[in-house]
Image (tube, helix red, strand yellow):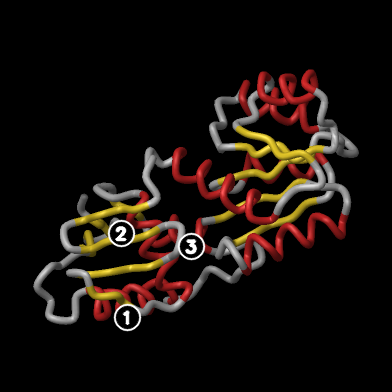
Amino acid sequence: MRILIVEDEHRLANNIGQILREKGGYATDIVYNGIDGLHMIKTEPFDLVVLDLMLPGIDGIEILHRIRKDNINIPVLVLTARDTRDDIIEGLNAGGDDYLTKPFDIGELIARSKALIRRSYGQTSSVITIKDLVIDLTSHRVEVKGKRISLTAMEYHTLEYLAMRKGQIVSKEELLEHLYDFNWEKFSNVIEVYMSTLRKKIDPDKTHDFIKTIRNQGYLLEG
């Protein structure tokens, strides 16, 4: 999953990005002003935006008004030092989905981010079960027939995204856009490699065929 952080305090923004990458396993992009933030939201496919309200260029409230007016439904976690009741209500009414006030707890930031992303994909539970395959979105634990399967970070994130989109065809391009940040060079066979090793690990006997390849379209994890 891919998160955009829009925060003008460079050190804080970079720390949030590092936390979400290392502890949450997310691909993260960071911008430090509202103009760049609005542009990125409108042009790149993010799964969540972490948005400060007091930004140079365009403030967070205005960004919320503009993206919601354009029917951009990316979940937004408002991160702000403005912690009065009226400030919080204003942020939520403008289109924010949740909020955290500074200073914030790291565990709460990650938990709220995970919850917002799950809900945006219609997934209310933190555990996804598909036949004999069980994926715990909180612990990143994967089991097949009760046996734990050891996956690399990118194998897990590939499986997680397919599980969030279970029953739908997901193209290679979509996987690349949601699993890597803006600076990643996307012209390679990296997805094919991860898909091959992932299939071998979750279905070594080739009895389940969890992940199907749909010719010229992409991949399908049936629900």
Badge 3: residue crowd in 10 Å (few <14, some 14–19, many ≥20): some
Residue 5 lies, in percent from the top left, at 71, 50
The disc at residue 218 is 2
The amino acid type found where label 1 is placed reads Thr
Residue located at (44% from left, 78% from top) = 152
Horizontal side of 167 relative to 32 (left or right) equals left
Q: Which residue has dot 1 on it?
A: 197
Mark 2 or mark 3, earlier in chain: 3
Residue 204 lies, in percent from the top left, at 18, 81
Q: Secondary structure at mark 1?
A: helix
203 and 31: which is toward the camera: 203
Horizontal side of 63 relative to 201 (left or right) equals right
| C-alpha gap between disc 3 and disc 1 | 17 Å
Mark 3 or mark 1, earlier in chain: 3
Mark 2 or mark 1, earlier in chain: 1
The reply to whether residue 45 is in sight is: no
Q: Which residue has dot 3 on it?
A: 176
| C-alpha gap between disc 2 and disc 3 | 12 Å
Residue located at (60% from left, 25% from top) = 70
The amino acid type found where label 2 is placed reads Gly
